[in-house]
Structure formats: C-alpha cells, structure tokens
Image: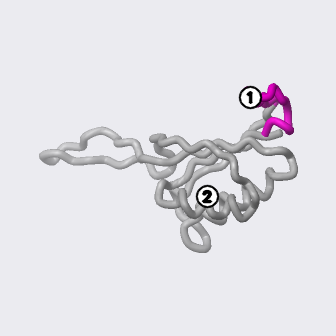
C-alpha cells in the first residue's frame, strides 16, 4: 500500500479528479494548502517598499492506493495537473510514501481491503 500526496494548482483540481476517475481511482481527500517552491511566492509592493513573501494557494490531494494503482494514479495526476504539453513551473509535486496499515473504522477491516 502507498499514500500518494499530490500538490497541484487549484484550477487543475477538476481535471485531476476527472483523470483519476478514468483510472478508476475514486477515493481521495482534498485540502487547501499554501506554500511556495521554485515560484518563490509572490511579492507585493506598497509605497515602493517590498512587503514580504506571500504564500501561493495550492490544493493537496491524499490518496491511499494498493500497489497495482500506484502508477495509474501518478499518471492520472500528471495528465490532469500538467499545464500544456510540457508543463510549467508551479504545476506541483507528487510524493509517494509507504503506508504501513489502513483500518476501516466501520468494519475493522485492515490493510488493502480497508482501502
């Protein structure tokens, strides 16, 4: 089992969800997050002075999958989240983490069956 964490542009959320549905990945958690990477955030100026770095709004997806769905999930996120054919800085990142266990609260099922 793996936990896939993807950070994408908010404008790409619907495209990513559609791509995930095509890959038969239908369970996910979505959170609004803020941060900056290569984009270095956004700087504002007030009366000619630079006012700090503003964080850029992004969307974070958390998706728990069995091994067979790891690559289809990654491919779907890339397909839905990329800007244009080659992408642009700020399109986001995907992190794949090992997932030791999963428990369905309602039934007590564990592991891949609980996902």
Residue 115 located left or right of residue 58: right
Magenta span main SS: loop
Q: Which quadrant holds the N terminus?
A: top right
Q: Residue furthest left?
A: 47
Q: Which mark is residue 71?
A: none
Residue 72 located left or right of residue 51: right
In the image, residue 108 lies in the stretch drawn in magenta: yes
The residue carrying mark 2 is: 17
Residue 65 drawn at (x, y percent): 78, 45
Q: What whole-number distance in Å separates the C-alpha atoms at marks 1 and 2?
A: 26 Å
The residue carrying mark 1 is: 106
Residue 75 located left or right of residue 9: right
Residue shown at the point (78%, 58%) measured from the top left = 72
Residue in front for this viewpoint, 1 or 105:
105
Mark 2: few/some/many CA within 10 Å (<14, 14-19, 20+): many
Q: Residue furthest bottom?
A: 85
């Amino acid at each position: 089992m793996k936990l896939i964490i993807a950070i994408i542009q908010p404008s790409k959320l619907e495209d990513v969800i559609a791509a995930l549905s095509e890959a038969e990945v239908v369970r996910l958690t979505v959170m609004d997050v803020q941060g900056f990477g290569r984009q270095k955030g956004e700087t504002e100026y007030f009366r000619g002075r630079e006012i700090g770095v503003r964080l850029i709004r992004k969307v974070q997806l958390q998706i728990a999958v069995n091994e067979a769905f790891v690559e289809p999930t990654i491919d779907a996120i890339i397909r839905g989240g990329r800007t244009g054919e080659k992408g642009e800085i700020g399109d986001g990142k995907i992190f794949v983490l090992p997932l030791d266990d999963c428990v369905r609260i309602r039934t007590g099922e564990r592991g891949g069956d609980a996902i």
